[in-house]
Image: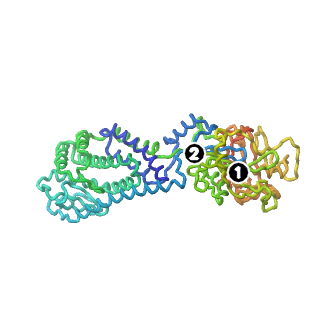
């Protein structure tokens, strides 16, 4: 569930703020900590986040890559093969299987409801008490209100149901004073009213409302409860600091004595209000006595901490497109968008959905009729020497399944060409004996095989223009050059791209991507990291242009060069479409 991921991410921020608070509480402006808590609150309540290359998650991923090389498959990983093409990705947060989600969801809803009921009932009970309060009307109150400009009307009332001052309400705020307030002690009254007015100006009641919502949503996380306590304290500390700064440091002792006097009258828990004396009194007194003039150094440090915590701890790991190469330059694969993507896997598995096999791209897991799949395979022959298809492995799974195809009933394209894979009939589970007998070590570290090959030395020619391959190419191969592969062989070769939406029309010699005519297709099969337009490119590639120059889309293959196959080509992970801007720019060049 997304709520648990949000809670885990926010926990990192909360821990960071708790540590900084313990070390710097009396050295930084108190508003600094409220800003830091606001960052944590956003992570708890907002179900999405921005990514950053400076995120701690990015560092964690780099460490993971360092200790667990990409060419090794680890327990808990999943793999997908398209023919010979293996694709591995670690699942950082695994959800429970769909069948097991309901008990977890039910427990979470029960906790959410219990917390919400507690806070709502407590708040409504006290609001009912507040309604009995009477307006405080005397010359001192009227004079004080005239000196406090605020668009919202602030009422000052008094009640015999409370023992210490508090503030409630957002749109129509009310400062509620005890009936026993000494109206002759104007100095003490100024301290109290100024403190409560700070709560109103800063919308502290709204922040407490959001904080309560976070506690209800994340009731299972003890760090959120710690945050709830500390935020309430820091709200009070910040207002105390504002009072001292308003009246001068000479009032610190008198203001501290006022707090001590109010603490003796401390009342019971009242959520969703700002209470003058609710924080730990000792911490407040010490903090008041240590207040000093704010220096530029402390302001700069505070801003740096807020920005740093936001960027490092409150962001997600940078996407592959944002990561920099060790030499400070963007790698060729990143520059051209040859990046791993779960979207391609989701598209490849979509064809199996009607047969009970579903893919969760958020967790990179397969389920067959609600049961977590350990091993899935669907291979079919391309010719007598090769095959194509896909597989998936997750050691935590409890069932092995495979695709069922009727090779006697071959699938025909719109042009009448025969697809060698045969018609997909369904999905069947392997028996328990087969499940137990399967060697999972081989599935973790599969042998490298190449399913579809091209015989460059065959000497076969065809009147249709087809691509050629080069192991040391300094310029792209164009569709217009005479090839050495027959259209039948080319159709079989393009089977490897079919799970990702790219199909070959043998009759017309055209490519289609998701039923759209392809104008331009490129596949950098292996690369030394240089752009093929740089003059330094060495590797294996293909570049195909539609012979008549027509087409609706330009597309490219996505490969992982860190996981080469037996021929040294990067692992194919998908097909991506160039943007409209790139399409238009290529049109202009042509």
Residue 477, by quadrant, is top right
Residue 524 percent location from the top left of the image: 71, 44
* Mark 1 element type: strand
Q: Which secondary structure lies at badge 2?
A: loop
Can residue 584 be seen at all in this image of the molecule?
A: no
Q: Nearer the viewer, residue 137 or 207?
A: 207
Residue assigned mark 2: 396
**Marks 1, 2: nearer the viewer:** 2
Q: Where does residue 582 sit, x and y in percent of width and height?
A: 66, 53
Q: Is residue 529 left or right of residue 280?
A: right
- Where residue 265 appears, x then y in whole percent? 17, 51
Location of mark 1 (residue):
378
The residue located at (30%, 49%) in the rendering is: 232
Is 284 positioned to the left or the right of 310 in the image? Answer: left
Residue 84: quarter of image:
top right
Which residue is farthest front? 433
Q: Answer whether labels 1 and 2 touch (C-beta < 8 Å).
A: no
Q: Quadrant of residue 216?
A: bottom left
Which tag, 1 or 2, sits closer to the chain's start?
Answer: 1
Mark pair 1, 2: CA separation? 20 Å
Nearest to the observer: residue 159 or residue 589: 159
**Foreground of the two, 363 or 207:** 363
Figure check: 233 above or below 166? above
Seen from this angle, which residue lies furthest left?
Answer: 184
């Amino acid at each position: 569930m997304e709520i648990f991921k949000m809670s885990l991410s926010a926990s990192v921020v909360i821990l960071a703020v708790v540590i900084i608070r313990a070390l710097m509480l009396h050295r930084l402006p108190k508003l600094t900590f409220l800003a830091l808590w606001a960052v944590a609150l956003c992570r708890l309540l907002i179900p999405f986040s921005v990514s950053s290359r400076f995120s701690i998650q990015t560092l964690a991923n780099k460490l993971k890559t360092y200790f667990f090389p990409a060419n090794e498959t680890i327990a808990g990983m999943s793999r997908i093969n398209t023919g010979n093409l293996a694709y591995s990705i670690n699942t950082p947060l695994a959800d429970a299987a769909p069948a097991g989600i309901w008990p977890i969801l039910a427990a979470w809803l029960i906790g959410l409801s219990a917390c919400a009921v507690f806070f709502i009932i407590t708040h409504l009970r006290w609001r009912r008490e507040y309604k009995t309060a009477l307006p405080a009307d005397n010359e001192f109150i009227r004079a004080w209100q005239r000196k406090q400009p605020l668009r919202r009307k602030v009422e000052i009332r008094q009640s015999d149901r409370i023992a210490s001052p508090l503030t409630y309400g957002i749109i129509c705020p009310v400062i509620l004073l005890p009936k026993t307030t000494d109206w002759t002690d104007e100095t003490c009254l100024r301290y109290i009213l100024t403190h409560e007015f700070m709560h109103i100006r800063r919308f502290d009641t709204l922040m407490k409302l959001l904080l309560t919502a976070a506690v209800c949503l994340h009731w299972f996380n003890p760090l959120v409860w710690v945050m709830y306590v500390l935020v309430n304290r820091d709200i009070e500390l910040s207002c105390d600091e504002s009072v001292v700064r308003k009246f001068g440091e000479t009032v610190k002792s008198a203001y501290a004595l006022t707090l001590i006097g109010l603490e003796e009258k401390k009342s019971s828990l009242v959520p969703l209000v700002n209470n003058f004396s609710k924080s730990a009194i000792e911490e407040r007194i010490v903090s008041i006595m240590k207040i000093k003039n704010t220096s530029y150094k402390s302001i700069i440090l505070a801003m740096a901490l807020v920005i740093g915590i936001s960027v490092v701890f409150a962001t997600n790991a940078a996407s592959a497109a944002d990561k920099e190469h060790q030499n400070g330059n963007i790698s060729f694969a990143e520059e051209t968008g040859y990046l791993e993507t779960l979207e391609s896997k989701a598209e490849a598995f979509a064809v199996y959905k009607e047969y009970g096999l579903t893919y969760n791209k958020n967790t990179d897991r397969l389920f067959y009729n609600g049961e977590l799949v350990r091993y899935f395979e669907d291979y079919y022959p391309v010719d007598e020497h090769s095959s194509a298809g896909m597989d998936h492995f997750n050691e935590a799974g409890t069932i092995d399944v495979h695709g069922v195809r009727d090779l006697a009933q071959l699938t025909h394209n719109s042009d009448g060409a025969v697809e060698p894979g045969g018609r997909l009939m369904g999905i069947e589970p392997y028996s328990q004996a087969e499940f137990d007998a399967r060697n999972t070590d081989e599935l973790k570290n599969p042998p490298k095989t190449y399913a579809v090959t091209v015989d460059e030395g065959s000497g076969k020619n065809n009147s249709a223009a087809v691509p050629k391959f080069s192991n040391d190419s300094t310029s792209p191969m164009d569709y217009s050059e005479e090839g050495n592969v027959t259209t039948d062989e080319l159709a079989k070769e393009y089977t490897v791209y079919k799970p990702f939406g790219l199909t070959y029309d043998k009759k017309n010699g055209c490519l289609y991507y998701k039923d759209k005519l392809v104008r331009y297709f490129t596949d950098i099969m292996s690369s030394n990291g240089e752009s093929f337009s740089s003059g330094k490119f060495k590797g294996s590639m293909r570049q195909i242009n539609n012979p008549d120059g027509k087409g609706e889309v330009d597309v490219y293959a996505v490969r992982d060069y860190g996981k080469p196959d037996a021929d040294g080509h990067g692992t194919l992970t998908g097909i991506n479409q160039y943007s409209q801007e790139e399409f238009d720019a290529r049109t202009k060049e042509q």
